[in-house]
Amino acid sequence: MPIKHVLSTVMLAAGTGLASAQSSLVLFGKIDSGYVDKIGTKTAKGDKGLGEGAQSRFGLRGSENLGNGLSAFYWLENRFKSDTGELTTARFFQGQSILGLKGPWGTVTMGRDYIAGYVEVQMAPDPFIHTGVSSMVAFGNGNIGTVRNDGAISYKVESGPLGFVAQWARDTNPNSATLPGPLTAEHPVGASAWYQAGPLFLGYSYENPGGVHDVWHFAAMRAVLGPVTLSAGYGQGETNTQEERRSWVVGAHMPVGGGRLKVVYGDLRNTSASLPISRKMALGYNYNFSKRTFVYLNIARDRDATADRNGFDVGVQHNF
């Protein structure tokens, strides 16, 4: 091989090594598989059988150091069904699809992202972190808000124990089974703030999902008392048809025998007509084989479900 070709190859390899040192790429995800008996679907085909306690997923994330305290990062996260390999929705990167910049002044992200405060505040009272038959997501957003927004621009800043995030999003329905989704009346907006110091967490979130009238407020707390973690949340808001709603949820979890024992109860009510929408209790246990793999058994009952008020899921989850 001519010496100039050898030198070119060495220089290219050196350049590639430099780029690799400055940027990163991580493959991550989880695969969950088990037997599921869903709540509220007694007459539906496939209401019980092989399924998932938590949505299986894979993703790519990484960052690049731009110097002077500035970095660029991205997060792409898929959702799929472990029993069939199908996508769960029309969006390939259903979980998240964001590009961001981070500096001493905070973080700015753009793309399909969680609503402001979903992870930090709405999920905080739920020891089941909004997964499976035991999910308390309806009590976190009142069945008024959503979980993600398309075309979102978010700003997040944290200073010591305090954190704040605000978000503005494109006026499209982020849960549509077709693309592009139908338009919402307004641009969805939201904000949240929280305080986290030692064993105590306090948080508040506000969401306008994009309708003319819909709005949702939610406050949460979490406290670690010895081996037990206690949590609670309270929400209040209005649907787009101007139905007033209120929710509350209380939960607890603690380590037991190499795993975690979890319990939660939530109440969601139409306060305009003094009618219950959902009153749900769940109990579950995870046994950890390792830091990445565990088996689980969760049971739940919703006394206001229109069909099949009882449900459970039992299975195994591996994280990578």
Image (spheres, helix red, strand yellow):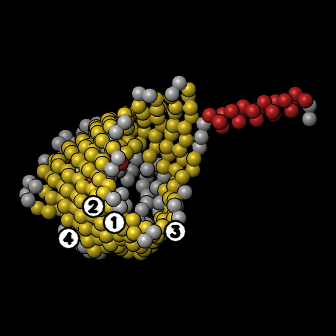
Q: CA distance from mark 2 to mark 4?
A: 18 Å
Q: Residue at x 37, y 34 (%)?
A: 159
| Circle 3: element type | loop
Residue identifier under label 3 = 289
| Circle 4: element type | loop
| Circle 2: element type | strand
Quarter of the picture containing the N terminus is top right
Q: Which amino acid lies under the numbered mark 4 shown in the image of this protein?
A: Arg
Label at residue 191: none
Q: Residue at x 39, y 72 (%)?
A: 297
Q: Which amino acid lies under the numbered mark 2 shown in the image of this protein?
A: Gly
Residue count near mark 2 (Cα–Cα under 10 Å), binned few <14, some 14–19, many ≥20: many
Residue identifier under label 1 = 262
Looking at the image, residue 27 lies above or below residue 17: below
Residue identifier under label 2 = 251
Q: Are marks 1 and 2 in contact (CB under 8 Å)?
A: yes
Q: Quadrant of residue 129?
A: bottom left
Mark 4 or 3, nearer chain start = 3
